Amino acid sequence: MTRTEQPVSVDRMMDSVRDAEDSGLEAVRKFVDTVNGIFPDLSEDGPRRKIIDSAFKMTEELVAASTNLAEKIMKALTEEVD
């Protein structure tokens, strides 16, 4: 791979990571909207709150994994060019 080819590969990879994160976040948003529509908001420690908290924890893990993958790919591409 030449130095001029790397930015295209990196840009494509970053776009893919962003698209995956956006899709995951949108899925969680729809999930939370569905939960809000089904479960009444009875208390702070009720099932609705626990389900929504779990969805946000899942989102945090998804974004962290996606970021970790992007960092590893960037490192591999950088090492390949050097």
Image: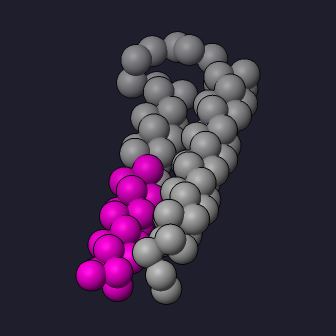
68 in magenta: yes
Q: Position of residue 44 (x, y in %)?
A: 40, 17
Q: Residue at x 37, y 68 (%)?
A: 74
Q: How is the image coloured?
A: one colour
At x 55%, y 58%, the residue is 11
Q: Position of residue 18 (x, y in %)?
A: 56, 49
Magenta stretch bounds: 63-82
Q: Is residue 73 above or below residue 68?
A: below
Query: Depth check: 13 or 19 in front?
Result: 13
Q: Quadrant of the C terminus?
A: bottom left
Q: Identify whether 16 is placed above or below 31.
A: below
User: Residue placed at 40% from the left, 45% from the top?
Assistant: 60
Q: Quadrant of residue 32?
A: top right
Q: What is the total number of numbered labels drawn onto the structure image?
A: 0
Q: Is residue 80 magenta?
A: yes
In which quarter of the view is residue 50 placed?
top left
Residue 42 location (% of width, % of height): 52, 14
* Residue 48 in view of the camera: yes
Q: Is residue 44 above or below residue 30?
A: above
Left or right of 46? Residue 76 is left
Relative to 16, 37 lies left or right: right
